[in-house]
Amino acid sequence: MRSAPLVPRHPEALDAVVTLRGAAFGYGDRPVLTDVDLTIHSGEIVAIVGPNGSGKSTLMKGVLGLNERTAGSVSLFGVDSGDFHDRARIGYVPQRHTLSASVRATAEEIVSTGRLARIGWLGRLRAADRQVVARALEVVGLADRASAEVSTLSGGQQRRVLIARALAAEPDVLIMDEPTAGVDAASQHVLADVLGRLVERDVTMVIVTHELGALERLLTRIVVVDGGRLRFDGSPQEYAHARDRVHHDHDSHHHDHELDGHPSLAHGPLDSTHPEGRRP
Ligand SMILES: Nc1ncnc2c1ncn2[C@@H]1O[C@H](COP(=O)(O)OP(=O)(O)OP(=O)(O)O)[C@@H](O)[C@H]1O
């Protein structure tokens, strides 16, 4: 059961899922990201892209409160993150995470633990909960492998089990860190189809990725992280336009670095108040 709704402090942020204002994140003395202003609204499908080590995972962990914030603020569903305790509303599939070979559990059992995160660890799964678990396995295309030991599943299938586990909590937003990394091309397409089904079910998603690839058609918005800051934030159309122009103007450089020096991108809208960034 969902706990009582928290009263948002900022009524204008009612449909804001995540709001960062002047946020900075780092490790020890080492800043990784600074001056992050970003609002993600309900219904958006946002890709966070950028080169290796640019801070994409750090940004996501910062949103989740898993690493240190050195400045600014983070609000979740309009509530300051320090006062936000309804963690089950946020589903998280961490990077490079598959299940250890020593885990002796079936796919269904793993996905059920996601349901327990919603109903309480000491709770018992009722018929309705089992249905949610079954539906989550169905969405990721593993209904027929529900009773398979997870150690017998491929890396791509294990990642789908972990996505289903996050879905079983019926989160209001799903944050996925490189869901398609480290899985073979066939599994990548299956995963893109899975994410497509989630889009149809109106799941708000934030997807960290190296490459847009098969995901691009699903997105409402693309955010580029590079050089310790957000460098671009706009619709896929704006991104494609900007990317083409950058490639046209400078044909030999890596475009993410070129975004850095491109005035219209460096000062692009860092908040999704523009309609193209939202799903109709
Ligand atoms: N736990 C940590 N302690 C110290 N430094 C860290 C830690 N995690 C990440 N870093 C550093 O922070 C920077 C950003 O890393 P992060 O993993 O956020 O980048 P990324 O964009 O997600 O990279 P990738 O695309 O390779 O996954 C890197 O320089 C990394 O070495």
Image (cartoon, grey):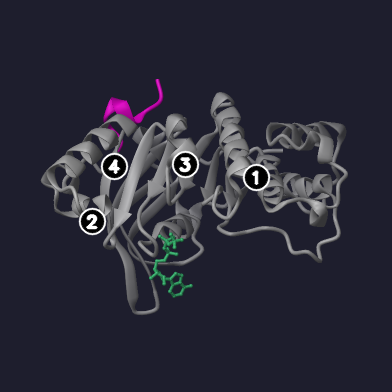
Whichever of callouts 1 and 3 sits on the residue coming sooner in the sequence is: 3
Q: Mark 1 points at which residue?
A: 163
Q: Quadrant of residue 274?
A: top left
Whichever of callouts 3 and 2 sits on the residue coming sooner in the sequence is: 3
Q: Name the residue under label 4.
A: 233
- Residue 39 seen in this snapshot: yes
For the residue marked with disc 4, what is the amino acid? Answer: Asp
* Disc sitting over residue 29 in the figure: none
Whichever of callouts 4 and 2 sits on the residue coming sooner in the sequence is: 4
Gap in angstroms between the C-alphas marked 1 and 4: 26 Å
Question: Residue 29: horizontal and vertical position, in percent?
Answer: 34, 79
Instruction: Say what secondary structure mark 2 lies in.
Output: helix
Q: Is residue 202 left or right of residue 211?
A: right
Whichever of callouts 3 and 4 sits on the residue coming sooner in the sequence is: 3
Question: Residue 39: horizontal and vertical position, in percent?
Answer: 35, 42
* Span highlighted in magenta in the image: 272-280
Furthest residue to the top? 280
Furthest residue to the front? 252
Q: Mark 3 points at which residue?
A: 77
Quarter placement of the N terminus? top right
Gap in angstroms between the C-alphas marked 3 and 4: 20 Å
- Which residue: 41% across, 25% down? 279
Instruction: Say what secondary structure mark 1 lies in.
Output: helix
Instruction: Say what secondary structure mark 3 lies in.
Output: loop
Q: Does the magenta stretch include residue 222?
A: no
Decide which of 164, 98 is in the foreground and name it.
Answer: 98
For the residue marked with disc 2, what is the amino acid? Answer: His
Dominant secondary-structure state across the stretch colored magenta: loop
* Disc sitting over residue 257 in the figure: 2
- Disc 4: CA contacts within 10 A as few (<14), some (14-19) or many (>=20): many
For the residue marked with disc 1, what is the amino acid? Answer: Ile
- Which residue: 35% across, 40% down? 222
